[in-house]
Image (spheres, rainbow, N blue to C red):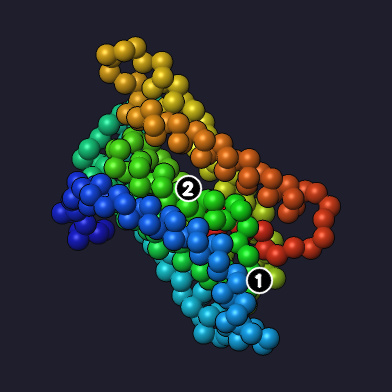
Amino acid sequence: MFPYVEDYDGYAVKRLMLENVDVLGYLSLGYLALVWKGPAVVRRLNGETNRVSNSGLLRYAIIVWNLLLSAFSFFGMIVVVPAFLTRISQRGMLRALCGSNDEMFYRSSAGFWIGMFVLSKAPELVDTMFLLLQGKTPPFLHWYHHVTVLIFSWHTYCDHTSTMVLFAAMNLTVHFIMYFYFAMCACGFKKTMRKFAPFITMLQILQMVVGSLVTTYSAYKVYTTPEGAAPGCHVSRANARMGVIMYMSYLYLFSEMFLNSYARPKKPVADPTAAGKKV
């Protein structure tokens, strides 16, 4: 379906990322500075008339941005998900998750989309800029999710972590739905789309449950492998630790958001799914 990706060289992308790992630090620090100082800057730009936040141009930009991310996620999903399912049918679930496969990871069409998925975590930081320009303060879950996914994805791809294929498949699927939802809300269908918000959050929670189980299992395999023996899962100890901490924290935060937004009595709040606009 995508003949232009057949010559994709994921090893070159990996080398580029390793040689420029300092850029990851600059992106992360710059992003956190944006989260910290952004609201004050936007307030000055808005003035008393909210000229930026109420701009029609901003609304159109948000629509286009979300549609682009939804389309990107869709095309990645229809390649990576079938490739992972085929791998499961051929090797079984555990070997599909834990077995090393350089060809699939760095050379195939699925490898191309996995690489693009990892690189897309940098431009996805623009989500926060749009949130700020609308006069909103990014909640903790929003910016924590963005910056940690950026760091974890970079490390996971360069470390050739076997479980990355599943993480990419899940994230691309959820993002295809989520960004389409945001685009429709920006188009003026927010009242119609609001009924789908709890289900999107539930999908995100399911993603975090699976991620928590997989990272915990891979960490167990890594830490119980005898000294000198082949690893039970193609995951480094550093990546296993990062994965467990990241997914467990996401599971807690997304579950808390769901309970606060839909289960507990509360005052009306803004669209809660915006907090998870990220993984």
Q: Which mark is residue 190?
A: 1
Q: Position of residue 53 (x, y in %)?
A: 60, 80
Q: Which mark is residue 148?
A: 2
Q: Amino acid at mark 1?
A: Lys
30 up-or-down from 79: above or below: below
| Left or right placement of residue 261 versus residue 197 in this view | right
Secondary structure at badge 2 equals: helix
For image coordinates 23% across by 49% down, the residue present is 19
User: Number of labelled discs?
Assistant: 2
Q: Position of residue 28 (x, y in %)?
A: 43, 55
Q: Nearer the viewer, residue 125 or 99?
A: 125
Q: Position of residue 5 (x, y in %)?
A: 21, 57
Q: Nearer the viewer, residue 251 or 110?
A: 251
The crowd level at tag 2 (other Cα within 10 Å; few <14, some 14-19, many 20+) is some
For image coordinates 67% across by 58% down, the residue present is 272
Q: Nearer the viewer, residue 263 or 243?
A: 243
For image coordinates 42% across by 69% down, the residue present is 68
Quadrant in the picture for residue 36 = bottom right
Q: Position of residue 47 (x, y in %)?
A: 64, 85
Secondary structure at badge 1 equals: helix
| Left or right placement of residue 208 versus residue 220 in this view | right
Q: Earlier in the sequence, mark 1 or mark 2?
A: 2
**Which-is-in-front pick, marks 1 and 2?**
2
